[in-house]
Image (cartoon, rainbow, N blue to C red):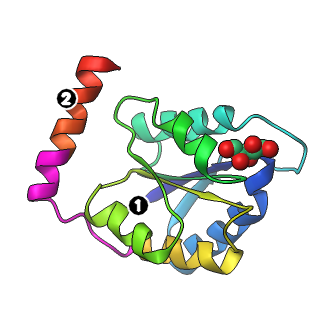
Amino acid sequence: MKVGIGCDHGGIVLKNACIEALKELNIEYVDYGTYTEDSVDYPDYAEKVAKAVLGGEVDKGILLCGTGIGISIAANKFRGIRCAHITNVFSAKASSEHNNANIIAMGGRITTSEEAKEMVLAFFSTPYAGGRHQTRLDKITEIEKNYL
Ligand code: RB5
């Protein structure tokens, strides 16, 4: 398992917390930036990580911005990306178990580093359940084909 991680200036503190969690899990990662607190545009980092996931450079992604909202909206514009904006451990687990999310997004202005680490641990230790959930994901793929 290799994880791509990216953020804007509003998510940089959480990015470092997520990297610590990945290290604890012995999960390899690629850091796509940003690397400083200078203001940047979150769609640029959503694009880097979404392309890395879709291209197979990494298996899953983590995106961070101020709220997690903008960067998840941008990532979900890529066909095949299921980016889940998560705010607690329950949604972290469900985004893997039910939605087979290939990217999770969190917000540095609404989530603490400790909460983010717990969510990363929960997401990566919860398998996708398949079954009835796959029927629903297939319908999302149909929507992508028909409307994206
Ligand atoms: C940047 O100021 C902020 O808008 C961004 O990090 C994010 O919260 C957008 O959804």
> Label 2 sits on what residue type?
Glu
Say if 61 sits above or below 78 in the image: below
> Between marks 2 and 1, how big is the CA–CA gap?
27 Å
Say if 33 sits above or below 12 in the image: above
Residue assigned mark 1: 1
Residue 33 shows in this picture:
no
Residue 34: in magenta span: no
Report the side of 88 relative to 127 (left or right).
right
Percent x, y of residue 74: 55, 34
The residue depicted at 41 percent of the width and 35 percent of the height is: 54
Classify mark 2: helix, strand or loop.
helix
Report the side of 39 relative to 46 (left or right).
right
Comes first in the chain, label 2 or label 1: 1
Work out which quarter of the rendered image holds the C terminus and state it.
top left
Percent x, y of residue 118: 54, 79
Residue assigned mark 2: 142
Percent x, y of residue 68: 61, 52
